[in-house]
């Protein structure tokens, strides 16, 4: 029970800090949300390659994997795993393979919702 | 009140008068909402693990569920309300990725299902995939070269 509480608190703090960094970037640099997301996913790849992000995942759990930096983490981790298994080919197969579920869910549910719901009229 | 002459002076004047706490408030809101979404993700992951789902699958399934919830909340016009309060707290989590797909797709549905919905889904998600996947390919190639 105690472990569960600690894991949820760690996720809250880690995820909160990552989102707070995003907010600081928006307020201070005037980066648009699209640029923030691109920056975060790319940073996730780089930090994973440097071996830093894995530590963050070990501490924060979902707090590190749920933000978009975690998407970059999954991409990079998948690429490394497949390189170990299939050599150079793995650099091209591993990333998308590891994130296939999230990407497909985003496309499928995204399409479904976009078609099923009516947009709110602009006020 | 002192007269304001140039644009520079005006900007400085506004910055002086603007409440400093606004930036702190934005950061705190992003921290809280982003934290809650991630804590929710951890809750789902814990629940899946307790049901015997392997750790890696649990993380993937969590992402899948959050994407689904993010898309649904966007469709119900709830996510944009959260976004107005939370700023980056709603943009940075993967639910925000789903929101970035559904929001423009819904808005441009009048342009049709192919060039409206189908294309606009990727206005933001497209660049994310392009740069994320490309970065992972480069990282993978470097990893390959360092290993052999």
Image: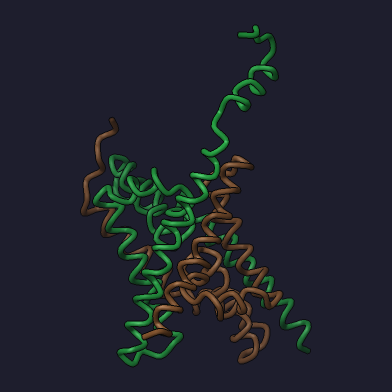
Chain colours: A brown, B green
Viewer-nearest residue: B62 or B82 = B82
In this rendered view, identify the residue nearer to me: B71 or A86.
B71
Q: Position of residue B106 (x, y in %)?
A: 31, 47
> Which of the pair B120/B59 is nearer the observer?
B59
Q: Residue at x 49, y 51 (%)?
A: B28
For the C terminus of chain A, which image quadrant? top left
Taking the image as shown, residue B74 lies to the left or right of residue A64, namely: left
Q: Residue at x 56, y 60 (%)?
A: B130
Residue B138 image position (x, y, % from top left): 69, 71
Seen in the picture, residue B22 relative to B56 is either above or below; the reply is above
Q: Say above or below: B3 vs A92.
A: above
Q: Is residue A73 above or below residue B86?
A: below
- Residue B85 percent across, percent down from the top left: 39, 45
Horizontal arrangement in the rendering, residue B144 relative to residue B114 (left or right): right
- Left or right: residue A84 compared with residue A61: right
Q: Quadrant of residue A110?
A: bottom left
Q: In the rendered picture of this protein, how many numbered marks are placed on residues?
A: 0
- Check the picture and name the quadrant holding the N terminus of chain A: bottom left
**Image: A39 above or below A76:** above
Residue placed most toward the observer, A5 or A59: A5
The location of residue A57, given as percent across then percent down, is 55, 77
Residue beneath the point at 60% across and 67% down: A44
- On the image, which quarter does residue A95 sit in? bottom right
Give the residue drawn at x 68%, y 9%: B5
């Amino acid at each position: 029970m105690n472990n569960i509480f600690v894991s949820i608190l760690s996720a809250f703090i880690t995820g909160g800090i990552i989102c707070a960094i995003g907010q600081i970037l928006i307020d201070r640099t005037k980066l648009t949300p699209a640029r923030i997301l691109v920056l975060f996913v790319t940073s996730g790849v780089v930090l994973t390659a440097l071996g830093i992000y894995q530590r963050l995942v070990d501490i924060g759990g979902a707090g590190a994997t749920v933000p978009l930096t975690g998407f970059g983490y999954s991409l990079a981790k998948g690429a490394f795993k497949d390189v170990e298994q299939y050599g150079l080919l793995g650099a091209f197969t591993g990333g998308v393979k590891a994130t296939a579920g999230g990407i497909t869910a985003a496309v499928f549910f995204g399409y479904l919702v976009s078609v099923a719901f009516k947009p709110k009229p602009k006020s | 009140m002192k007269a304001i002459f140039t644009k520079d002076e005006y900007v400085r004047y506004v910055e002086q008068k603007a409440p400093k706490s606004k930036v702190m408030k934005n950061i705190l809101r992003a921290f809280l909402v982003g934290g809650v979404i991630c804590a929710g993700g951890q809750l789902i992951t814990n629940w899946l693990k307790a049901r015997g789902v392997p750790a890696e699958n649990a993380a993937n399934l969590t992402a899948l569920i959050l994407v689904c919830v993010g898309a649904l909340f966007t469709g119900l016009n709830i996510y944009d309300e959260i976004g107005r309060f939370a700023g980056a707290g709603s943009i940075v989590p993967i639910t925000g990725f789903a929101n970035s797909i559904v929001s423009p797709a819904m808005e441009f549905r009048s342009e049709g299902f192919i060039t409206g919905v189908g294309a606009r889904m990727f206005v933001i998600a497209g660049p994310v995939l392009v740069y994320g996947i490309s970065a992972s390919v480069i990282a993978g190639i470097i990893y390959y070269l360092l290993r052999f």
